[in-house]
Structure formats: C-alpha cells, structure tokens
C-alpha cells in the first residue's frame, strides 16, 4: 500500500513539474513571438524612417544641385565678363603697342634714309679726297723732279759740290738770322716802351673810372651788330631753321628781339660764346646763311678761336716770363682771356698777380721765377670750373698735379683762398697779390650780389608803404613799378605816395643816375557769363 501511495504521489509531482515546464516553454515561445513581432514592427518603422530620410536627402541634394548649377552659371558669367574685359584691355594695349611700333618704324625708316643720305655724301667726299690725294701725289712728284733738275743745274752753274753749297747757304742764313734777331730785339724794346706807356694810360683811366657812375656788367651775353632787318630775317631763316642750326652747331642761345640792329648770343661757356659771336659776324659779313654754310663757318671759327686761345696763353706766359708750361696749360691760360670775375679779365688778372708775386718775392729774398709761376697759374681752374665740379682752387691744383708742377705751386694754387693750410711762403704771397689785384681802384666793377641786393632793396622800400600790393624793380634798377590797392588809395593820394617813395629812395639808397617811380592804381570788375 505504501509503495503505491508513494508512486501516485511521485507521479502527481511529475505532472505538476511537467505543467510548470510547459508553462515555462509557452512563456518563452510567447516571448519570442512578441519579440519577433515587435522587431518586425520596429524594422518596418525604421525602413519607413529611412525611406523618409532618403527622400528628404534626395530633395535637399536636388536643391543643392540646382543652387550649385545657378552659382556655377553666375560664376561662369562673371568669369566670362572679366575675361572679355581683360581681353578688351589686352587688345587696346596691343593696338597701342602696334601704333607705337608703327611710329617707331617710321622714325627708324626716316633715320635709315638720313643715314643712307649721309653715307652717300661720305662716299662722294671720300671719292673726292682720293682724287685730290692722287692729284697731290702727282704734283709732289712733279715738284720733286723740278727741284732735282734745279739742284743739278745750280750745281753745274756754281761749280760747287753739295757740301760746299750747304756750307755757303748756312753761312748766309746765319748772317740773316743775326740781322733779324737784332731787328726783333729792337722791335721788342720799342713795343715794350709803347706797352709801358699804354699800361700807364690804362692805370690812369682805371683810376678815373673809379669815380664814374656805377653800372652793371653782364658776363653771359655778347651782342652782334646786324646791318638791317632783312639780314636779321636771314639769320632766323625760313621757319627758324637757320637759327636752330646755328644754336645746334655752337651750343648757345641766340636771342632775336625787336631791338634794331642787334642780335644777342647767350651762353655760360665764354669760349663757346666767343665762337658763336665770331661765327655770326662772319656769316653776316658773308651774306650766305644756310645750315650747311653755318656748320662750315662754325667749324672754321672754332679752329681759329682755338689757335687764338693757344697764342693768348703763350703770350701771357711770355709776358709773365714763365717757361716750361705744357700745351694744355697754355690752352687753359688762353681760355682765361674770355673769362671775367666781377668784370675783371682773369687772364690779365693772372699776369698782374704774377708780377706782384715776383716783386714781393724779390723783396723777401725768395725765388722770383717760382713766385711768378705760382701767380700766373693760381686761377687756372677758372677756365673749366663751369664744366668740372668743385671750386677753382682745387680744380687748378688737380690740373697742375697732372703736369708735374712743383709742390709750392700746387699748394699756392689750392690755398690762395685759405681753403688748405699754407705749406710754403709762396701761398700767402699769392693770396696777398690776388687781393691787391682785385682791390685796386678800377680793378673790378659792381658785383652781381650787390646788383641783386640793390633791386631787392628797391622793392622792399616800395612795399613798406601802406596800401601797396606789389612792387617790381625793372630796367636794371632804373625804374620801380608800384601796384596799389584802389580801395585804400585814391587818385589824390597816389601822387603823394609816389613822391614819398622817391624821397625815401633818395635818402636811404645809393644808385647810379636816377630811379623812376611809377605808381599804378586800377579798378578791375570781373564777372562770368554762364
């Protein structure tokens, strides 16, 4: 009984356990079914969300694509316009370059044509020169043959040999030279006496000139007399071609104004101005004035002036008794003849300083010849101071160094204005002689600085009066024009003011001759039509 009961009890427990297991399996299956259904629903929702996001992305992508296309089109249009503008500018630049190139080609063609013409002229001139050389050679040959024939005939007639004839000829030449030397010495003595009398008269005249009325001296212009207005027109030439050719050939400015019978030549280079003056005078005397003739006359005049300059330098060295100068130094000395300093001729001043230096050196027991050399060359730099930078003492010292002058001469030239320390006794001698020559009565005329200061003083005196707007000194300081304010100065007061200005000029200034005071009062009414 007990075992059956035990079995029934056990089977009952197993049934309960099976039911529990079944319940658990059913729950698990339900859970899996629920999870499967929930996952499927979630997946469907996710797929819908994804489809929605894809559609939105496609829509945004389409919008961005359209916007990008619009931006690309706008950028393309902008770049196209910019390219067209740059292309247009490039075309314009190319057209300008083409025009410039065409103009340059025209100029080059003209120059080539000119060069071809000059080459043809040169070839023709060379041909003429060769022909002339052949003629000269033939003539020289003929002359040599004639001389040989004459020599043989003379030897036959005289019955002398060549050596004997040479001795006779040298003896006769020696006698003739001695005779001519005696005549030259006598002539030199006579000339020296006449020169001494002339110099003494000049000293008296310059002393008298000291008390003459002051006058200004223009050292940059020369005047050429013209016989009539017809010749003045020929100097100018058709459309001014003659005067332009003359200015180009000489390097000066030619001023042709209404002044009758005068043409003014202006230049800072005194030698160039002298060449222009002499050349213009020769052209006026000749009457044939055209560009080719102008160039020919100017070249001839240059050669003549260069010869005159060298001769003047040699004469100055001879007058100062200075020997052994280089040809370039003599040329520079000659150029000083056309150079003035405050109206004083620099070459004559240099010779005068040489004499003074010798006199003082002899009194002090120094070398008179060396002192003369220092004095003559002390202003040598003034011959080229308009071409070379620096003061004339340093320029002259550099020139003399190149030609091997003694140290005393170089120091005297460089230090005669106290620019450097005096290394020898000749330097203060030159400085003293230079001051004596410049300060002697009549040695120099009114300086440019004093002249300009006098004009400025005239204008300042006039503008000090109340009611004066402007004042101008004209006619080289011989007249002053005064412009007054019409509102503050009436007609009656104008005459009194002019008189007061004249009185003040008389009391406060020193001037040559008289000064005319012209007072101008005017009323100007200005309006504009629009």
Image (cartoon, helix red, strand yellow):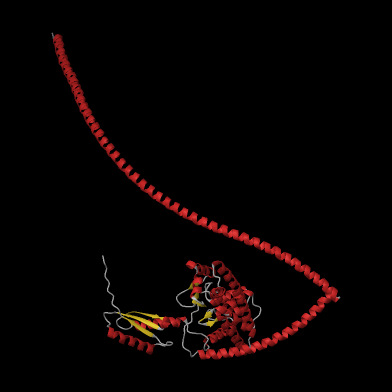
Q: Is residue 482 above or below residue 123?
A: below
Task: Give whichever of 522, 404 is nearer the camera.
Answer: 522
Q: Is residue 255 above or below residue 104?
A: below
Q: Is residue 109 above or below residue 326?
A: above
The N terminus sits in image quarter:
top left
Q: How many marks?
A: 0
Residue 233 position in % (x across, y down):
49, 72
- Examine the image and state in which quarter residue 112 appears: bottom right
Residue 414 position in % (x across, y down):
56, 78
Residue 409 position in % (x across, y down):
60, 79
- Examine the image and state in which quarter residue 305 appears: bottom right
Residue 341 position in % (x across, y down):
52, 81
Task: Give whichever of 26, 127 is nearer the camera.
Answer: 127
Tell me if 413 is positioned left or right of 468 in this view.
right
Residue at 30% across, 84% down: 494
The C terminus sits in image quarter:
bottom left
**Residue 427 is at least partly visible in this image:** no
Task: Give whichever of 210, 57 is nearer the camera.
Answer: 210
Residue at 28% across, 75% down: 524
Task: Give whichever of 501, 519 is nearer the camera.
Answer: 519
**Residue 237 is at least partly visible in this image:** yes
Tell me if 78 is positioned left or right of 155 in this view.
left
């Amino acid at each position: 009984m007990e075992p059956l009961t035990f079995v029934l009890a056990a089977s009952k427990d197993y049934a309960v356990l099976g039911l529990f297991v079944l319940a658990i399996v059913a729950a698990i299956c339900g859970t899996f079914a629920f999870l499967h259904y929930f996952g499927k629903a979630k997946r469907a929702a996710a797929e819908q969300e994804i489809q929605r996001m894809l559609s939105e992305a496609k829509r945004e992508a389409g919008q961005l694509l359209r916007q990008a296309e619009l931006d690309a089109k706008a950028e393309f249009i902008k770049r196209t316009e910019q390219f067209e503008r740059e292309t247009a500018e490039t075309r314009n630049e190319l057209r300008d370059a083409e025009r410039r190139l065409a103009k340059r080609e025209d100029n080059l063609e003209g120059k080539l044509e000119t060069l071809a013409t000059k080459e043809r002229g040169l070839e023709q001139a060379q041909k003429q020169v060769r022909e002339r050389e052949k003629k000269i050679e033939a003539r020289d040959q003929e002359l040599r043959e004639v001389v040989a024939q004459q020599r043989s005939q003379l030897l036959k007639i005289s019955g002398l040999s060549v050596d004997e004839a040479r001795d006779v000829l040298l003896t006769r030449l020696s006698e003739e030279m001695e005779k001519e030397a005696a005549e030259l010495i006598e002539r030199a003595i006579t000339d020296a006496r006449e020169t001494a009398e002339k110099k003494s008269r000049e000293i008296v005249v310059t002393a008298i000139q000291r008390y003459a009325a002051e006058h200004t001296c223009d050292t940059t212009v020369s005047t050429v007399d013209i016989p009539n207005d017809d010749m003045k027109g020929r100097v100018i030439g058709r459309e001014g071609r003659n005067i332009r050719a003359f200015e180009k050939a000489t390097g000066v400015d030619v001023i042709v104004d209404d002044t009758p019978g005068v043409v003014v030549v202006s230049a800072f280079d005194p030698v160039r101005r002298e060449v222009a003056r002499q050349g213009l005078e020769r052209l006026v005397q000749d009457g044939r004035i055209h560009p080719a003739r102008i160039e020919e006359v100017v070249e001839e005049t240059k050669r003549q002036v260069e010869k005159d300059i060298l001769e003047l330098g040699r004469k100055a060295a001879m007058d100062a008794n200075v020997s052994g100068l280089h040809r370039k130094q003599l040329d520079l000395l000659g150029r000083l003849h056309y150079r003035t300093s405050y109206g004083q001729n620099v070459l004559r001043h240099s010779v005068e300083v040489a004499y003074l230096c010798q006199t003082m050196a002899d009194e002090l027991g120094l070398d008179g010849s060396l002192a003369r050399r220092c004095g003559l060359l002390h202003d040598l730099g003034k011959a080229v101071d308009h071409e070379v930078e620096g003061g004339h003492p340093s320029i002259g010292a550099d020139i003399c160094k190149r030609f091997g002058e003694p140290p005393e001469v170089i120091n005297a030239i460089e230090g005669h204005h106290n620019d450097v320390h005096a290394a020898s006794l000749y330097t203060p001698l030159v400085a003293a002689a230079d001051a004596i020559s410049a300060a002697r009565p009549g040695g120099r005329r009114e300086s440019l600085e004093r002249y300009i200061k006098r004009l400025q003083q005239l204008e300042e005196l006039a503008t000090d009066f109340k009611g004066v707007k402007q004042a101008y000194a004209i006619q080289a300081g011989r007249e002053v024009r005064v412009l007054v304010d019409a509102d503050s100065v009436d007609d009656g007061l104008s005459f009194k003011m002019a008189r007061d200005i004249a009185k003040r000029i008389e009391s406060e200034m020193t001037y040559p001759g008289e000064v005319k005071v012209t007072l101008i009062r005017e009323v100007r009414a200005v309006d504009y039509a629009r």
